[in-house]
Amino acid sequence: MRAFLGSLFMACAALWAGAGPSPAALEASPRPAARPAAGQPAALPAVALAAGVAVSPRPAARPAPGPTTSTESHRVANTAFERWIDGFRPRAIRAGIAPEVYDRAFRGVRYNTSVIQKDRNQAEFTRQIWDYLDSAVSPTRVRNGREALRRHRQTLAAIERRYGVEAEVVTAVWGLESAYGAYKGDIPVIEALATLAHDGRRKRFFEDQLIAALRILQSGDTAPGSMRGSWAGAMGHTQFIPTSYLAYAQDFGGDGRRDIWGDDPADALASTAHYLAKAGWQKGQPWGVEVVLPRGFDFDRAGRRVKKSPSDWQRMGVRAATGGTIPDHGPASILLPAGARGAAFMIFDNFAAIERYNTADAYVIAVGHLSDRIAGGGPIRAEWPRDDRALSRNEKIEMQERLTRRGFDTRGIDGIIGPNTIAAVRAFQRSQGMVPDGYTSFEVLRRLR
């Protein structure tokens, strides 16, 4: 579900940490910005995409949307938008949408300036991973996750048996996407997608999502008034975008409808498990394990491109943070999401399966770690470099420009921190006698200046 979903891909609504109806139990938790996309299944999940700017359908993280009244107050008459609706109708009909379905779906739809404002603002949003995890895996979210697992244990156990995805993992995705169903979004999906398609910044993407949403209505799975979600079109308990819904949604309850919006989360949770299964989830394999690196570790060996068996890593001095031996769960890489001064993880293929839901490393770590905590595991042991601050997109662009001018070519100036920029930072760090961990810290930018 990279679609579910470049540093800017902000498709979906924000994350909330509490579960349950009481507002006091809720805690805002924005979705993290996505890493540059790698491969992704067709019709990515619903969660991701709605508002991003980059390649993947998954959006960058944004703070939770405001109350419905705020959004409703920004629904305005717009003659150009109304002409666009009329002009889009023939295309929808050519795509197989019945005229009466189209007309019913657009009844009462208005241009929503709040949606455009959120789309414009999302690109500058950035947080450090430790700030994100403080919210995403807060004590409230862990406690509510354990309660959600207990309350829906029978359903989640049946989903685990059918799709081979552990109940705690499905619960963790649910917790990050909608605070276990407490906040699913209340913006009309047709209105949000039409507004974004008319705006034109990602015209083709949002037009495709709009056609998919109309197909969902035509199938009878839900009605226009019930199809509500985030400002970017992500829907339901686990925030599927329309194309991902069409590809992966499940009728787990057997009532003939794939209902991811209602009070009963069974269809949504099964849809998430189905998506992760199709993304390659391997039951029994961890997403990752926190590790401690030996003194003198060669940081060229860190990163997704280097894979070794856990036994090979352990022969090099890498140890589980909790002590003991790390079982051989298959090839693994060492990930340093905050550089040498932060936590280190040995990550397995299941990391990539969660990544299909959202390409941001911070999101994947949050889902994995939250699932571990729900299952009874402890917190991350390592300290984070909390004295460091996040770089803005403009500062990332500046860093790439300065690196390239100094002879450390980033092979592109786009503000997206991918493998080429990391390699350039690592080479520059070596030239300065710094630890060559490839971490794009403010200290690196300061030295470049």
Image (cartoon, rainbow, N blue to C red):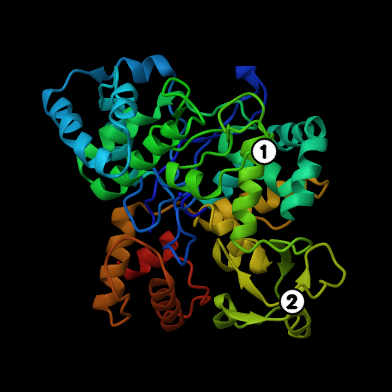
Instruction: Check residue 396 in the rendering and tell me which mark sits there, or answer none.
Output: none
Label 2 is placed on what type of residue? Answer: Val
- Secondary structure at numbered mark 1: loop
Label 1 is placed on what type of residue? Answer: Ser
**Is residue 372 among the parts visible in the rendering?**
no
Q: Nearer the viewer, residue 392 or 280?
A: 280
* In this picture, residue 404 sits left or right of residue 37: left
**Residue that appears at 30% across and 76% down:** 411
List x then y, in percent, for residue 332.
67, 75
**Residue that appears at 27% across and 37% down:** 196
Q: Nearer the viewer, residue 267 or 31?
A: 267
Which residue, given by chain and number where applicable, does mark 1 sit on? 138
Quadrant in the picture for residue 446:
bottom left
For label 2, the crowd category at 10 Å Cα-Cα, with few meaning under 14, some 14 to 19 and many 20 or more, is many
CA separation, marks 2 and 1?
28 Å
List x then y, in percent, for residue 389.
46, 51
Which tag, 2 or 1, sits closer to the chain's start?
1
- Residue 331's place in the image compared with 387, above or below, is below
For label 1, the crowd category at 10 Å Cα-Cα, with few meaning under 14, some 14 to 19 and many 20 or more, is some
**Residue that appears at 62% across and 55% down:** 276
Which residue, given by chain and number where applicable, does mark 2 sit on? 318
- Secondary structure at numbered mark 2: loop
- Residue 119's place in the image compared with 347, above or below, is above
Quadrant in the picture for residue 194:
top left
* In this picture, residue 242 sits left or right of residue 262: left
Picture quarter with the C terminus: bottom left
